[in-house]
Amino acid sequence: MIGSLLSNAGVWMPLAWLFVLVVTWAIVYYIRSRGEARYHKDTEQVRPFLAGHPETSKAAMHVRTSNEYWGFMEALKGYYHPLIKGHTGNLNDYICWFICILAIVLVLVISVGV
């Protein structure tokens, strides 16, 4: 019998784990070897299929977030417009908000006595 080392995390048997690793590698290699043999990396096969339409530039093909989430943003417009006004893009403002909220949380934690 292969000796084992019993620990708090379970049984550690290096030879058994090595055997499992080799068997797993053999299964993965077998599955991979059954793949399509006619695939060639640097040919037309690697281009995306766009239902017969030619691929244009990456910038023209890119779907903008404003288009993708239009319905979501339109439905929550009343919530987002006040938030957009508060976002200045200035890092100092965000750090100030972070410090203020952190101070409030600290006061709450100290007052509760956690």
Image (cartoon, grey):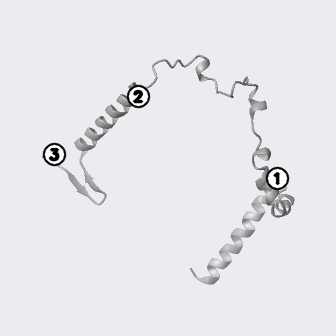
User: Relative to the observer, which residue lies in front, 67 or 93?
Assistant: 67
Q: Residue at x 58, y 82 (%)?
A: 113
Which x, y percent locates residue 2?
A: 16, 45
SS of the residue at dot 2? helix
Q: Quadrant of the C terminus?
A: bottom right
Which x, y percent locates residue 72?
A: 76, 55
Q: Residue 1 vs residue 40: left or right?
A: left
Q: Indicate which disc, 1 or 2, sits on the residue closer to the N terminus.
A: 2
The residue under label 2 is which amino acid type?
A: Arg
Instruction: Please determine whether, in this image, residue 18 is positioned above or below residue 29.
Output: below
Query: For the residues carrying marks 1 and 2, which lies nearer the camera in this image?
Result: 2
Question: Label 3: which residue?
Answer: 2
Which x, y percent locates residue 65?
A: 76, 45
The residue under label 1 is which amino acid type?
A: Gly
Which x, y percent locates residue 10?
A: 28, 57
Q: Residue 12 vs residue 63: left or right?
A: left
Question: Label 2: which residue?
Answer: 32
Q: Say few, some or many: other residues with alpha carbon within 10 Å of mark 3 (under 14 / 14 to 19 / 20 or more).
A: few
Q: Which mark is residue 89?
A: 1
